[in-house]
Amino acid sequence: MTDTSAYVPPKVWTWDSESGGRFASINRPIAGATHDKDLPVGQHPLQLYSLATPNGVKVTIMLEELLAAGHADAEYDAWLIRITEGEQFSSGFVSINPNSKIPALLDRSTETPTRVFESGSILLYLAEKFDAFLPKDPASRTEALNWLFWQMGSAPYLGGGFGHFYAYAPEKWEYPIDRFAMEVKRQMDVLDKALADRPYLAGAEYSIADMAVWSWYGALARGVLYESAEFLSVQDYTHVQRWAAEIADRPAVRRGIKVNRVWGEETNQVPERHSAADIDAKAG
């Protein structure tokens, strides 16, 4: 559908109505808490407040990978934040993440509890805290960080750009869908070429770069993001497909994607996680 009506921007933009679409009720041009509510606190030093969106699963995958690698101190409590109900705007959540976006982490093992927000920052914080999933060789470490920050800069075009206009906007508009589809396909080609001669993004070593990129682009390649696999011809990116399938088969990844999930098959839903038993109780 082509929108033939021309929009003339006003001299000064004002917010006087919801913009429409799936998330219109929680979008607003101001920051800060909308209500007072403390966050729950569990027994473990690491407290995660999140939802199993692509950004959320980056961190639960990392935590499950750390536990699988023998880092017992990575035990964590994962609390569900229902973003469609505005729980990210509580005073407790805003005190950890003033940007009101999931995921947010509180590390209570430090002398003064350390707040960590933005998913890439959380991955890097945990990698450095546990000395894991970040290459020690300077060149490989830099390559991992290159791809970590590539994801942070690129994924908004996939999610807020393509995903919004293709799946969530109140109407289908040709121009933004075509524009962002072109960009997402370019990004997939970037990944496909990078993975043509290496098993993982930083080289031979699985790292936080793979966890971060897989959460978005692995989901896209596997056909579980925006029901857009056919539209974007994701099967054409053979190296991305190989990489995405291998990571999806990792036991810690299969565990991590279930945490803070409240949709889909019942066996894949672990709304809150306070011990390994919460995931073990779900078959599949």
Image (spheres, grey):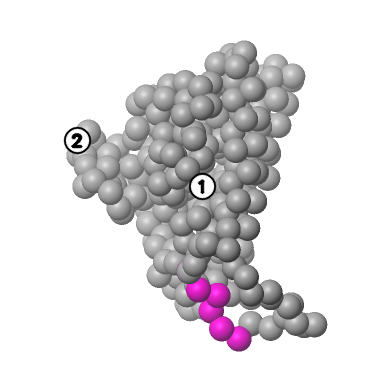
Tell me if 251 is positioned left or right of 90 in this view. Answer: left
Query: Which residue is at a point 58% across and 58% down the rendered structure image?
Result: 174
- Residue 197 position within the rendered picture, expressed as x and y whole percent measured from the top left: 62, 13
Question: In the rendered structure, which segment of residues is drawn in magenta?
Answer: 16-21
Q: Nearer the viewer, residue 64 or 177?
A: 177
Q: Residue furthest right?
A: 11
Question: Tag 2: residue type?
Answer: Ala
* Picture mark count: 2
- According to the picture, the residue beneath numbered tag 2 turns out to be 283
Magenta region's main secondary structure? loop
Query: Tags 1 and 2 in contact by the CB under 8 Å rule?
Result: no
Q: Earlier in the sequence, mark 1 or mark 2?
A: 1
Query: Which residue is at a point 37% across and 57% down the rendered structure image?
Result: 80
- Residue 54 position within the rendered picture, expressed as x and y whole percent measured from the top left: 48, 45
- According to the picture, the residue beneath numbered tag 1 turns out to be 55
Query: Which residue is at a point 53% across and 62% down the rendered structure image?
Result: 1
Asked which secondary structure carries label 1, the reply is helix
Let me know if residue 33 appears in the view. no
Residue 260 sits above or below residue 61 on the image:
below
